[in-house]
Image (cartoon, grey):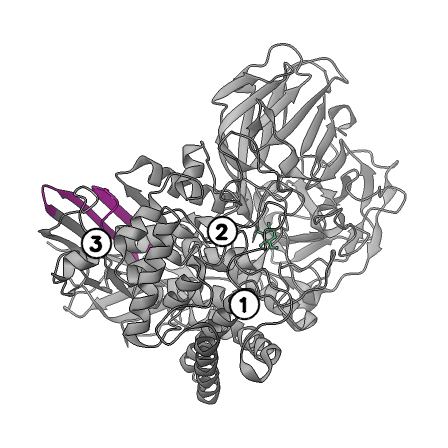
Amino acid sequence: MTSLHLHAPTFEHHQQPFGIGEPAPRLSWTVTSDVPGWRQQAYEIELSDGTATGRVESGESLLVPWPGTGLRSRERRGARVRVYGADGSASDWSPWSWAEAGLLDPAEWRAGAAGPPLDLLGVPDGPALLLRREFVLRGRVERARLYVTAHGTYEVELNGRVVGDDVLAPGWSSYGHRLRYRTHDVTDLLREGGNAIGATLADGWYRGRIGFMGGKTDIYGDRTALIAQLEITYADGTIDTVVTDGAWRCATGPVTGASLYDGEKHDARLLRRGWSEPGFDDTAWLPADLLRHDPARLVAPTGPPVRRVETLSPVEVLTGPSGETIVDFGQNISGRLRIRVQGPAGHTVTLRHAEVLEGGALAVRPLRDAAALDQYTLRGDAGPEEWEPRFTMHGFRYAQVDDWPGELDPADVQAVVCHTDMRPVGAFDCSDPLLNRLHDNVAWSMRGNFVDLPTDCPQRDERLGWTGDIQVFAPTAAFLYDCTGPLASWLADLAAEQAELGTVPPYVPWVSLLFPPAPAAAWGDAAVIVPWVLYQRSGDLGLLRAQYPSMAAWVDQVAGLTGGNHLWDEGFQFGDWLDPAAPPDDPGKARTDHALVATAYHAWTARIVADTAALLGRSSDAEHYTALATEVREAFRREFVTPSGRLACDTQTAYALAVCLDLLDGPEQRERAGRRLVQLVAADDHRIGTGFVGTPLVCDALCSVGAYDTAYALLMQRNCPSWLYPVTMGATTIWERWDSMLPDGTVNPGEMTSFNHYALGAVADFLHRTVAGLAPAAPGYRELLVRPWPGGGLTRASAALETPFGRAEAGWERAGGRLELRVVVPPNTTATVHLPSAPSRPIAVGSGEHVFTCAFRDPADDPGPADRAAIMEI
Ligand code: BGC
């Protein structure tokens, strides 16, 4: 008895297709089938309005065009699918999935922007203010939707209950171009008769302080405001709309200070009990000001919001050198504390945060100009009081709790982990606990830095969407979490800012701090590489189509900067940022020539744009960029490569770039370059010698020239600098610097030292693709490449991924000179499997579970010739 089971279809990249902005959302579905090699022959889609495609002969199951008329604003429509296999099988109809559109036309926004009057508005990062109004329902409510966003960060309440579970809504986007609103189903929060809606509004990214070196305030404006439209549909079909307008009233509340960097102050004595419920007396409140806003900027989100994703309990309570109480949560996170405290009215508890301890005390120097300090002043009327700040965020593992009334019970302090609520999709495991911890640290650094946008760090006065960081980390990110939706939003911001500024700024959203937005290689190249990586991993060609003007404009700009010789050798560069040899106070002082890095990237991104143009059917563009890529590659070789394959820069990064980006001429140059790279790594005692640019490539470069054992020696190295050194130092996230903490336990003296930066964790993609052996061979993992390369003394390794077609796995285990490889291929896909035995012949397989065995011996167990490539070829 075989079974063919179809999961409910999904819409675009939405996890919850509610209030979506796409009128014709593409549909995807996955199948489970126990028939080996199952292929889809045809599909049938039915929409809840009766639209039916009939049988469509197609194997496509990923991002299939919406078959019906476009959704109208507010419209909810269902979709279901059934499929037919090439083997004659037929599924039942899938369950229905439902999508509801948000407001698709700016003209449908009747809400103004209601802002606190100037008399109440404090200095930036001052008090969070309350806004409210009441309304009366006319009859039985059929459905109610709240469309809401703000200039600032907000939390909305209806009749005393918080609406939704978003944290720091509306998140940070390039507000000047795109401000995301959320749609909430609030039907159940309404009641007969009198109702009240209220919002707490803080400055957030809109008006609060953002950026390093003192930062900036009032970046998007000096007046915060709520933009809310509550639409109530009665059972009789009539509609009432309550919008933000001059009828709202405003007052101060218990939050007396709220800063993303500095923390939150909450005086519970100032709580206005019942303020978001009907019947509250707001006559002493001031009328809100009606401010201007442009509804054309309002867009629906393409990814999930930031939420409270997990709660951690203390693992230990420590006493610091001055007798202070320090709570250790055992894990470096982005989030904040939740406390339960009982004590006298007016008593204030102070909470400080830090990622690491130095000399047993909180190490706050890495926070630079972010106070990361929360204060709660007790109401003191009977019973324990619970509190969690709502308008700030910290990066921390340790919290110092000062002035706690009485004895601190660890159960009364929890750490609430907050980040973009992405679906975890990828996993890795192996026989080495340190490598597993490294992988966990990478995942935690992704979590800590996907706080709405892909940021550099969650703790200090920065937290910016640095383009270079996500450029190198994107392949790893796309494996660990379903982040296509969130990154698509960030890329839309990038394109909008690029169009305005004439270049891709080094971080997005751009905030003008000390320097103008200058183009820089590997950072600006994110405009091309991030969409390309997302296309490879998600199969979404539409994303490439949307980003194409931005991708091409970037390459055109760089081509212009290089002048006639195609070498990008002038102007500012970050280069191989944080080369381990760079001094603590000069992280850009890398051993690899900036011009080599920049020209290599130019050749790479020109080629990607050529490939993209070809995919999009833009043949003359494809020709143009292909020619450009070829010319840049030639220019690179002329300038930086000797005829025999030595590079002008004798560094790990230079060779990694030349090998991985196909910048060498023929097998001889490659072979020579490969040998030199092996020598360089050996000369560094198998310690890492790369910064942001070389790190994601160096192990791949070594493997691609057959130097697997050198790659493993680098990977398994524990001495500083290496990937595992921080793990041996107790790291729970990826550090910004190879030596953010020095071997003696002191914090690196560089003023830019974070313990939660994902860039150097980009090696995780190598763990997935090569150590475990699970890689995409066609966009969206429509074809898999399973080519594990065991080594490093590991006795097993495995990776699993929820691909767009279903679950894929690759895992090997070895003992007694034999290796067993287990592969799971999702339905409707194929895999090419390479066994790590000589001679290795590729094996083509279809969906299902496959187990292979072969002879295998790891030279790490049996030291012999330096590199196994030699052994394999015997
Ligand atoms: C950030 C980086 C970023 C770099 C570039 C740092 O302050 O934290 O991750 O890419 O600056 O200058």
Q: Nearer the viewer, residue 122 or 571?
A: 571
Question: Would you say 223 lies left or right of 386 here?
Answer: right
Q: Amino acid at mark 1?
A: Ala
Label 2: which residue?
Answer: 759
Helix or strand or loop: what does disc 1 sit on?
helix
> With respect to residue 459, does 381 lie above or below?
above
Q: Nearer the viewer, residue 602 or 382?
A: 602
Residue 17 appears at what percent x and percent y?
48, 57
Which comes sooner in the sequence, label 3 or label 2?
Answer: 2
Query: Alpha-carbon neighbours of circle 3 within 10 Å: few (<14), some, or many (≥20)?
Result: many
- Alpha carbons under labels 3 and 2: distance apart: 30 Å
Q: From the viewer's perspective, is the residue at label 3 or at label 2 nearer? A: 2
Label 1: which residue?
Answer: 527
- Alpha carbons under labels 1 and 2: distance apart: 17 Å
* Numbered label attached to residue 824: 3
Magenta span covers which residues? 790-818
Q: Nearer the viewer, residue 776 or 347?
A: 776
Helix or strand or loop: what does disc 3 sit on?
strand
